[in-house]
Image (spheres, rainbow, N blue to C red):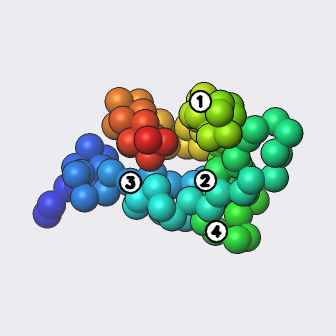
Amino acid sequence: MNILFFGEFVGEQNQTLQCPCGRVIVNPQEFKLLFLKMEMKEIDILCPNDSCYLRELGYIKFDIKDGAPVFKEAMFYPPFVTWNNSRLGSEVAMRLMKEHLR
């Protein structure tokens, strides 16, 4: 009888971000971006699942200098962060989220 421990289940192949709605996000290109808040210079990061109950997972803020956008900050919201921290562990989740925000 083989026993599978949680640590083995979250192996290298399963280290992917997931929205609380269940949608697995393998690479950052899967996120949808919505530039709705032009006056706030903010782009919303949306779940790729059109029927997601959270929908908005984070944001990207920028400034305009010499007519060109300049990155200011990017952040995922707490429900997305907490969900992935509990699934993958804090270190793995934070590393993956930082990679996805680059």
- Quarter residue 67 falls in: top right
In the rendered structure, the answer to whether residue 19 lies left or right of residue 6 reads: right
Vertical order, 74 against 55 (above or below): above
Near mark 4 (Cα within 10 A), the count class, few <14, some 14-19 or many ≥20, is some
What separation in Å lies between label 2 and label 3 (alpha carbons)? 13 Å
In the rendered image, the quadrant that contains the N terminus is: bottom left
Task: Tally the numbered discs.
Answer: 4
Say which mark, if any, is on residue 22.
Answer: none
What separation in Å lies between label 2 and label 1 (alpha carbons)? 23 Å
Near mark 1 (Cα within 10 A), the count class, few <14, some 14-19 or many ≥20, is few
What separation in Å lies between label 1 and label 4 (alpha carbons)? 24 Å
Mark in front: 3 vs 1 = 1
Q: Residue furthest front?
A: 66
Say which mark, if any, is on residue 20.
Answer: 2
Please tell me which residue lies in front, 31 or 72: 72
- The numbered mark, 3 or 1, whose residue comes first in the sequence reads 3
Q: Secondary structure at mark 2?
A: loop
Q: Residue 12 at x, y = what percent?
A: 22, 52
| Badge 3 amino acid | Thr
Say which mark, if any, is on residue 49.
Answer: 4
- The numbered mark, 2 or 4, whose residue comes first in the sequence reads 2
- The numbered mark, 1 or 4, whose residue comes first in the sequence reads 4
What separation in Å lies between label 3 and label 1 (alpha carbons)? 22 Å
